[in-house]
Image: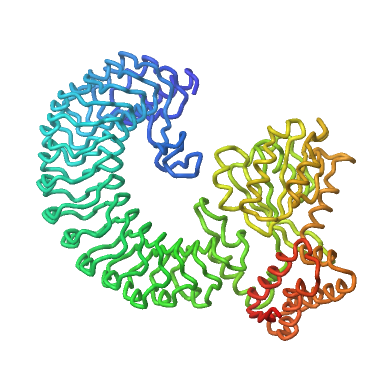
Amino acid sequence: MTREELLSLINQASNEGWKELDLSGKGLTELPPEIGKLTQLETLILGTWAKEKKGSQGIKGYEVIGNRIVPLIVGNRLQSLPPELANLVNLRKLDISGNPWEKIPDVITQLRHLEQLTLIRLDLNEFPELITQLVNLTQLDLSRNQLTQVPESISQLVNLTQLNLSGNQLTQVPESISQLVNLTQLYLSRNQLTQVPESITKLVNLTQLDLSFNQLTQVPESITKLVNLTQLDLSFNQLTQVPESITQLVNLTQLDLSGNQLTQVPESITQLVNLTKLDLSRNQLTQVPESISQLVNLTQLDLSRNQLTQVPESITQLVNLTQLYLSRNQLTQVPESITQLVNLTQLYLSFNQLTQVPESITQLVNLTQLNLSANQITEIPNWLEELPNLNKLDLRQNPLPISPEILGLPKPYPEPGSIEKIFNYCRQLRSGNVLPLNEAKLLLIGQGSVGKTSLIKRLIDNTFDPNQSQTDGLNVTTWTIHVNSKDVRLNVWDFGGQEIYHATHQFFLTKRSLYLLVCNCRTSEEENRIEYWLKLIDSFGGQSPVIIVGNKKDEQPLDINRRALREKYPNIKAIIETSCPISEDDGIDELRQAITREVGPMRQTAAQFPQEIQDDIIVDIDDVEEEINKPENQRNLTRLRKRLIALATIGATIATPVAGITDFANNAIDLGDKLGIELQLPSAP
């Protein structure tokens, strides 16, 4: 915002008697003295926490800086505040978050009627003592700064009801804080506290206390003096037990003990009968006591990331539960009695060892979200479609014959595929209209800015955009190609090459895929990190075929040691140079032909067999393709079984091993599984 635009806005606010003015995110470097005209203002926002906006990693209200997740602040670049700000005698709320200040301007002390002051993510390394002169403050937020101590003079803020000191470097809290007798909410998370300060236990009016992400090893008995607490957060500390006296906190409705080192659920907790939310995730629990059934008012229970091998029957008595989290345990089944949880709307069972969707779920008619991702489920039962309120179904990372385009991109991407598309695809599978064989996976990997996305657009659409932006994370598109007179749909995975994404590649790199390792012809073999990427493929993609693509050959030829790379990595099938700007010698057609050649693995492997059996193999493959192209109810299963067994055992008929025979056989077995045909292979002689 220019100075002229700002002055015009101030004049408008003055003429119209605005009570609130939001100037956050305007790129301001100074605030003009004309701001003093707005004597009617009650709220001035010069920076704010954008809680509803998504940050760079897609997390609402937060962004990632280094290895830290911090609040997403929309601020300015103000260096000071004009003295005329003191004219705002009616100002009650001031938010200056996200401005680069190491010291608070003195003029703030003249705003005697301030009730709310927010100073999130400034550069403060000392607690501004002048704030303690603002005795009418009821809410003070100094979170996400670099404070190492709090002055004794904080006791002057006798009207404070909310104090937020989270995300600093505090190792202790002053005794004087106990004089803030009107405090109802105190937030001290993400500091370096090693014990709960006794001074806090004197704040008997506290209803909310957050001590998460510190270094606490025990909870003092004195915490039970806080009898008005309704919310207590002790998550992500180093607690191994909870005192029995916690039962005296009879008004607790929310208790968070996640991320500690608890090996058992404290029996004392089960006496807190007013609890509605209980979080015990990320501990070392192997079982849950039967007495948990006493928490009859629980609506949310989180037991994820523990070591549970079964769902305790006692949980199924918590009939008011609406959300149940059991992800990342060691569950192999879910009890029938879960049907008693008729009020469940969200059920999370991801990252367990379930082999089928529990049929008992069919009676949970209020279920809206069901997460079964990363299990061993091979089939989606028809009855799932009968759950009337289900609108989100996560089945990603299961061995299902459904492409990621339908199920949704694998995690860490947040949203699964559309439930309508998933069920529609299942119906098509059952009707025989979808052919699992005619799909393949093509992955483009390499360093950032080598032109992977531009290459995809040339291959699929034959278009080129010189201003193509970098890929943020991962994109998946589809591309239909013609292989051996058959249409094959390629699921094309385009990876961002920036360093931040390399750690996530292992979640997506899979065996039996075709890899394009894209390099920049203008840079060296070392700068392209070719060996790094080839080793990554070898670790997670096995012996999947690789095509090295030297892109931007119009600027410089590709200079790599081709012979040495081929000798060390025999799965390199071709090394091709390309140029994305359209020209006669751009190498794109050559690359398309190489991709087509590699996508038909069964036929290609067949060509490597001795001539005397090659024709029979091709006949078997033709028969399989002919049958699966028929509607399901018209397929000759006997013929299919016979041909698949022949293909799966063909390796035993020759004396000399053939490259790719293992994948050749596995492809036949996998196809049999997808078609529901059990292949009883002949025993070895």
Looking at the picture, does residue 551 appear above or below residue 119?
A: below
Residue 62: horizontal and vertical position, in percent? 42, 40
Residue 194: horizontal and vertical position, in percent? 23, 37
Q: Residue at x 20, y 22 (%)?
A: 112
Residue 80: name its quadrant: top left
Please tell me which residue lies in front, 582 or 126.
Answer: 126
Q: Residue at x 29, y 26 (%)?
A: 147
Residue 32: name its quadrant: top left
Total of numbered circles in the picture?
A: 0
Residue 581: horizontal and vertical position, in percent? 81, 38
- In the image, is 391 to the left or to the right of 680? left
Colour scheme employed for the rendering of this structure: rainbow
Looking at the picture, does residue 288 appear above or below residue 130?
A: below
Residue 161: horizontal and vertical position, in percent? 18, 37
Q: Residue at x 72, y 58 (%)?
A: 490
Looking at the picture, does residue 460 appear above or below residue 169?
A: below
- In the image, is 629 to the left or to the right of 224? right
Q: Residue at x 48, y 22 (%)?
A: 5
Q: Residue furthest front?
A: 685
Q: Quarter of the image for the C terminus: give it.
A: bottom right
